[in-house]
Amino acid sequence: MTAHIIVACGSGVATSQTVATKVERLLKAANADAEIEAIDYKQLRTSIRSADIYISIVKEDTDWGVPVFNGVAFLTGVGQDAELKKLLAAIDDVNNR
Amino acid sequence: MSDSAASLFSPDLIFYGTHADSPAALLAQLSDELTARDLIGDGWLDAMLERERRFPTGLAMPAINIAVPHVDTIYVRKPYIALVAPAAPVRFEGMAGQDPVDATLIFNLGIANKSDQVGALQAVLDICMDPTTVYKLGQAGSAEELYRAICEHFGYTR
C-alpha cells in the first residue's frame, strides 16, 4: 500500500510545509509510493493514527508507534542522504504490507 | 498568488550590529521595530518567546548557523522577512532537540498567510546554502551590504 507520511512542526506555518515539499520532491525523484502531509503539532495525536511514517521537526519524547525520521536533515541538507535512504527503506516496508 | 520571497525582504527590515545576549533580548528589540512599522499585532513577543521555548528554531547549516523564529499567522499583520545580524552570535536552542547554535544571522519569518508565504522558509534556506551568498553576508559590514547580498542572491539589484 501507499505509505502515508506526516510532517509536524510547532505551528504548521512554515517548517513542516517546507520539509514536506522538499521530501515530496526527493520521493518523486526516487519513484517512491508515498503521500505526504504537513500538519500542525496540535493535530499530531489524531493524524498519527492514520500515518505510517512520521517526520519530526520538534523534540520527541513520545513513542508514537511508527518510524520517526529527522526532519532537520531535510532543512539543512546535513545528513540528508542518509536520512532519505532510511526513509525509502521504511516506505518499502509499508508498500510490501 | 504566492508572494515571491524576494519581495518579502526590505532594506528597512535588516538590522546590523544589534546588541543582544539572548534570543529573548534580540526578539524584544525586533518586536519594537516591527510594532513601529505596524507589521505585527499585540502578543507577538509573548507568542514568539513561548514558541521558541517549546519549538526552538536554531539551525546549523553547512556553512552558517542561523535561527528562523516565527509565530502563528494571527500575530502577523503584513507579511515580511526581517534579518538581524547581531554584534555577537546569539545562542538559540537547536530545532528538534539538536545541539544549540550560535546564530550569526536571524531570519524572522513574518507569515501572515500560510499559502501565500509558503516559499519564505525555503528561500531563506536557499540563501544560507549558497556559498557565495553566505560569504557575502559574512563580509557585510552594514545593513545595506547585507541587503545587497540578498538582492544579488535573488538575481536583481535595487
Image (cartoon, rainbow, N blue to C red):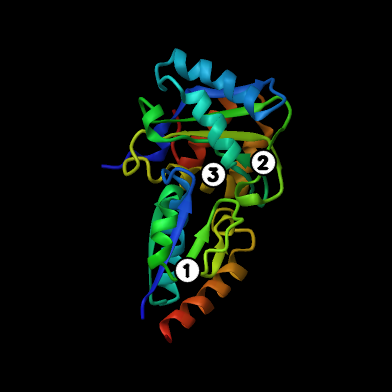
Q: Earlier in the sequence, mark 2 or mark 3?
A: 2
Q: Name the amino acid, label 2.
A: Glu
Q: Helix, strand or loop at disc 3?
A: helix
Q: Residue furthest left?
A: B1
Residue tagged by mark 3?
A: B127
Q: Confirm whether circles 1 and 2 share one chain.
A: no
x and y, in percent, of residue B109 in the image? 47, 35
**A63 or B100, nearer to the observer:** A63
Structural distance between the alpha carbons of marks 1 and 2:
26 Å
In front: label 2 or label 3: 2
Q: Residue at x 58, y 20 (%)?
A: B28
**Mark 2–mark 3 CB contact (< 8 Å):** no
Q: Chain of mark 3?
A: B
Rendered view: A8 above or below B81: below
Q: Quadrant of residue A96?
A: bottom left
Q: Name the amino acid, label 1.
A: Ile
Q: Chain of mark 2?
A: B
Structural distance between the alpha carbons of marks 2 and 3:
21 Å
The reply to whether residue B142 is visible in this rendering is: no
Residue tagged by mark 1?
A: A53
Q: Is residue A10 left or right of residue B138?
A: left
The reply to whether residue B18 is visible in this rendering is: yes
Structural distance between the alpha carbons of marks 3 and 1:
30 Å
Can you say which quadrant of the picture contains the N terminus of chain B? Answer: top left
Q: Name the amino acid, label 3.
A: Ile
Q: Is residue A96 left or right of residue A68?
A: left
Residue tagged by mark 2?
A: B93
